[in-house]
Amino acid sequence: MITEIGQGLSGLEQLRAFIASGQRPGIGDSLDFDLVDVREGFAAFEGVPGAHAYNPMGIVHGGYFATLLDSACGCAVHSRLTAEQAYTSLELKIAFHKAMTRDTGRVRAEGRVRSIGRRVAFAEASLIDGEGRLYGTATSTLLVFDR
């Protein structure tokens, strides 16, 4: 989707064009979250956890946390890429700080690039609610490569 919307644009320009298009990838539809902010080395996603993301114990599944945190880390790195580069996650480490339910309300995953080189990038992200309570954190290692 990004390359269709932003062919020939830098990573940051692609992400801005994606937000402006109002489109969502399938995972955003499935888990009901959106890319809401992007700057150089930064990306933020927001969503409202609900029963659609519950595990059998009646709380939000860890995969919901992981998806938002991975997306924030990945798009933060994407924002630093040229039009000729792409990335993929190599490793994602998550810490769960607090359980979420449908009563949690809107949450925000904010990702930041810690360092980026020719082939590898490192990013981190935090998942917070509207009151600033921390629900999860992640660190990510990403492979940077030519398209």
Image (tube, helix red, strand yellow):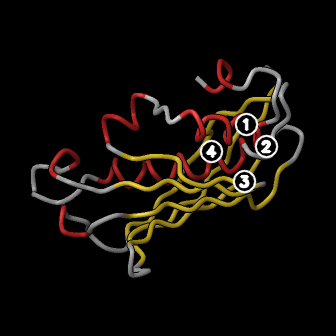
Q: Residue at x 68, y 60 (%)?
A: 112
First in sequence, mark 4 or 2: give its number.
Answer: 4
Q: Determine whether, in the image, residue 120 is placed left or right of residue 16.
A: right
Q: In which quarter of the image is residue 15?
A: top right
What's under tag 3, amino acid-wise? Phe
What's under tag 1, amino acid-wise? Leu
Quick one: quadrant of the C terminus? top right
- In whole angstroms, how far apart are the C-alphas of marks 3 and 1? 9 Å
Label 2: which residue? 120
Q: In the figure, 7 relative to 110: above or below?
A: above
- In whole angstroms, how far apart are the C-alphas of marks 3 and 4? 9 Å
Label 3: which residue? 122
Label 1: which residue? 143
Q: Residue at x 60, y 39 (%)?
A: 20
- In whole angstroms, how far apart are the C-alphas of marks 3 and 2? 7 Å
Q: Which residue is drawn at 45% across and 51% down?
A: 68
What's under tag 2, amino acid-wise? Val
Q: Residue furthest toward the right? A: 118
First in sequence, mark 3 or 4: give its number.
Answer: 4
Q: In the figure, 59 relative to 21: above or below?
A: below
Asked whether the beta carbons under mark 2 and mark 1 sit within 8 Å of each other, the answer is yes
- Mark 4 vs mark 2: give the one in front: 4
Query: What element does badge 4 sit on?
Result: helix
First in sequence, mark 1 or 4: give its number.
Answer: 4
Q: Determine whether, in the image, residue 130 is placed left or right of residue 110.
A: left
x then y, percent, for residue 107: 38, 64
Label 4: which residue? 74
Q: Which of these two is toward me, 25 or 23?
A: 23
x then y, percent, for residue 58: 10, 58
What's under tag 4, amino acid-wise? Gly
